[in-house]
Amino acid sequence: METLNLLIVDDETAMGKAVERALRSYTVQVPEVDLEVGYAIEYVDTGEKALDVINTRPPDILLLDHKLPGISGLDILNHLSGKPHDLLTVMITAYATLENAIAATRRGAYDFLAKPFTPEELKATVYRTTKHLLLCRQAEKLAGEKRRIRFEFISVLAHELKAPLAAVQQYLDIICGVDPASDAELIQRLAGRSLERIRGMRKLILDLLDVTRLESGQRPRRMEQVDLAAVAVAAVENMSGEAKKRGIAMEIHANGPLWVTADVWEMETVFNNLVSNAVKYNRENGRVDVYASAENGTIAVRVSDTGIGISEQDAARLFKEFARIRNADTDTIAGSGLGLSIVKKIATLYNGDVSLESTPGRGSTFRVTLKETATAF
């Protein structure tokens, strides 16, 4: 249970103590932030004492009498308005005029409670104030989290783009300084490296767009009948050139056609990412096996390879955004670090999941399970 500090300021001792008694065991439920709230209550009878409490142990909610001997309630509001604080004030007064309400509101009061009031009216006011305070704090927390995530995202993106851009610039600087007639082979080799780096950056940008579309819900989804076996065939064909160059055998295991209800782009994205990784992280003359099945509304995809594998420790973070496993085996392999996180997000849309079994040096198997009843954005 969350406990808020509540300060009562009223020169009428009987009134102050009555308010204290009414709220002593009072708790509220605030479902919007999933919290039960109680109150630690303190009572003072002068404005001077109130300022001392506010300055030394600031309350969350202030129940403030308008008319006090010495420093008045409006004086305290003036004091608060000139300083940063995280509390809400409810003015209590026997002079419930429109002018007083306007004056108190202009000085920062959140609400107004006219004397005499019932315990029910008091509790209703405290509940409204509590709810507003917690929602404001939650909004500020979310805004701060958004700023932090945005900063981290831009930092990672800048890091991922900085290295290939620097490489392309270096290659072009070399090309500009050589004789095209005598160094045609060198120019061709450096131009090829530049194109490879640019293709990697383009892949990163496209993957980022996919992530953004999935998370924002801006990409329209079209649920239709999709042949899962045909999608698997297309994914294998896309990587057949690279696989052939490295002597990697690929085989599809599917009793097709396999008609499922799904978004075709999402199914293509799942297969393309898994098959692409299986080839990229494979050994020379290795093997890739692609399995697809659909039964009782459940789609099962499995892609196995005989590649470099991954440790259990690295596997735990593999489905996070920009997760790149850096070691001697992967340093020369290009990738955005976003493909598997995209697969994970798509699986979530289908009330499914992704899992990995891997042995370093022997290979990996990725399993994706989806429900045909997809979750709407």
Image (spheres, rainbow, N blue to C red):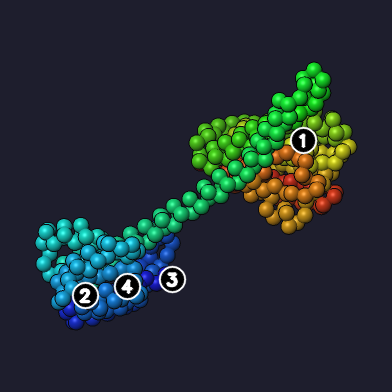
Residue at the image position 64 percent from the left and 37 percent from the top: 204
Q: Is residue 282 left or right of residue 156?
A: right
How far apart, in angstroms, are the residues tagged by discs 3 and 2? 30 Å
Q: Is residue 2 above or below residue 192?
A: below
How far apart, in angstroms, are the residues tagged by discs 1 and 4? 72 Å
Q: Is residue 155 above or below residue 42?
A: above
* Residue type at tag 1: Ala
Please provide percent x and percent y for residue 35: 42, 65
Q: Within the image, what quadrant is residue 96 found in? A: bottom left
| Mark found first going from the N terminus, 4 or 2 | 2
How far apart, in angstroms, are the residues tagged by discs 4 and 2? 12 Å
Is the Cβ of the residue at disc 4 closer than 8 Å to that at disc 3?
A: no
Please provide percent x and percent y for residue 187: 77, 24
Q: Nearer the viewer, mark 1 or mark 3?
A: 3
Q: Which residue is mark 4?
A: 55
Is the Cβ of the residue at disc 1 closer than 8 Å to that at disc 3?
A: no
| Mark found first going from the N terminus, 1 or 4 | 4
Q: Nearer the viewer, mark 1 or mark 2?
A: 2
* Residue type at tag 2: Gly
Q: Is residue 57 above or below residue 145?
A: below
How far apart, in angstroms, are the residues tagged by discs 1 and 2? 79 Å
Residue at the image position 31 percent from the left and 68 percent from the top: 61
Q: Which residue is mark 1?
A: 254
Please provide percent x and percent y for residue 304: 79, 43
Density class for disc 4 (Cα within 10 Å; few <14, some 14-19, many ≥20) is few
How far apart, in angstroms, are the residues tagged by discs 4 and 3? 26 Å
| Mark found first going from the N terminus, 3 or 2 | 3
Is the Cβ of the residue at disc 3 closer than 8 Å to that at disc 2?
A: no
* Residue type at tag 3: Met
Q: Which residue is mark 3?
A: 1
Residue at the image position 12 percent from the left and 58 percent from the top: 98
Q: Which residue is mark 2?
A: 47
